[in-house]
Image (tube, grey):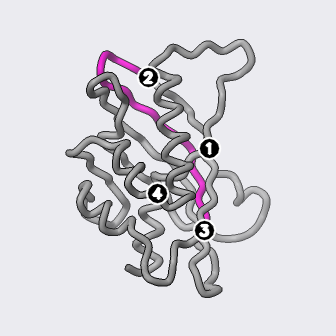
């Protein structure tokens, strides 16, 4: 699998959890959703595909620019590192909103990811927003749908570094 396809994989995967502002209050569902994202991030950075797969529903759908919808089986296939090894991934995400309604929740984030392919190729950087739908199954929050709107980052000014 080429680096371009793998970069799409990383878009919805790597998030840095932010805590609510001082004085903010999170309910248990929001805490669990933030923990899901934190676990996803840690597992992605360490290449633990099985843990990431365990954080999504069986009927998960990823929506990516310029690609057909991706289901869990395809996600699993493209998430396995190629023979050359896994590219180091760095990411930063700001959770803008989490809304919970019963056993469903949605979250939108500002996200920036950088992947450095093995072999000295230039790092690939993407930034933008994601919109994620989560579903609570058997008391556990899982990712059910994810619209990843990341686009390639160009330029190197400080303003370009903002997602």
CA distance for labels 2 and 4: 28 Å
CA distance for labels 2 and 1: 18 Å
2 or 4: mark nearer the eye: 4
Q: Which residue is most to the right?
A: 158
2 or 3: mark nearer the eye: 3
Q: Residue at x 27, y 59 (%)?
A: 70
Residue hosting label 4: 48
CA distance for labels 1 and 3: 15 Å
N-terminal of the two: label 3 or label 4?
A: 4
Residue hosting label 2: 99
Q: Which mark is residue 34?
A: none
CA distance for labels 1 and 4: 17 Å
Q: Are marks 2 and 3 in contact (CB under 8 Å)?
A: no
Q: Which residue is most to the left?
A: 59
Image quarter where the N terminus lies is: bottom left
Decide: is 97 above or below 115. Answer: above
Q: Please provide the residue range marked out in magenta.
A: 99-115
CA distance for labels 2 and 3: 31 Å
Would you identify the image quadrant in which residue 4 lies? bottom left
Would you identify the image quadrant in which residue 16 lies? top right
């Amino acid at each position: 699998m080429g680096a371009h396809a793998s970069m799409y994989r990383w878009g919805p995967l790597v998030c840095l959890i932010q805590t609510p502002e001082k004085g903010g209050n999170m309910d248990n569902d929001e805490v669990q959703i933030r923990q899901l994202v934190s676990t996803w991030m840690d597992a992605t950075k360490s290449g633990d595909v099985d843990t990431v797969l365990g954080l999504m529903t069986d009927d998960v759908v990823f929506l990516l620019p310029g690609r057909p919808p991706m289901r869990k089986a395809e996600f699993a296939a493209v998430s396995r590192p190629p023979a050359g090894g896994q590219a180091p991934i760095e990411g930063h995400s700001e959770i803008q909103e989490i809304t919970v309604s019963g056993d469903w929740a949605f979250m939108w984030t500002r996200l920036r990811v950088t992947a450095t392919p093995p072999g000295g190729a230039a790092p690939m950087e993407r930034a933008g927003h994601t919109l994620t739908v989560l579903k609570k199954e058997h008391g556990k929050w899982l990712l059910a749908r994810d619209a990843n709107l990341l686009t390639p980052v160009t330029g190197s000014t400080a303003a370009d570094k903002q997602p």
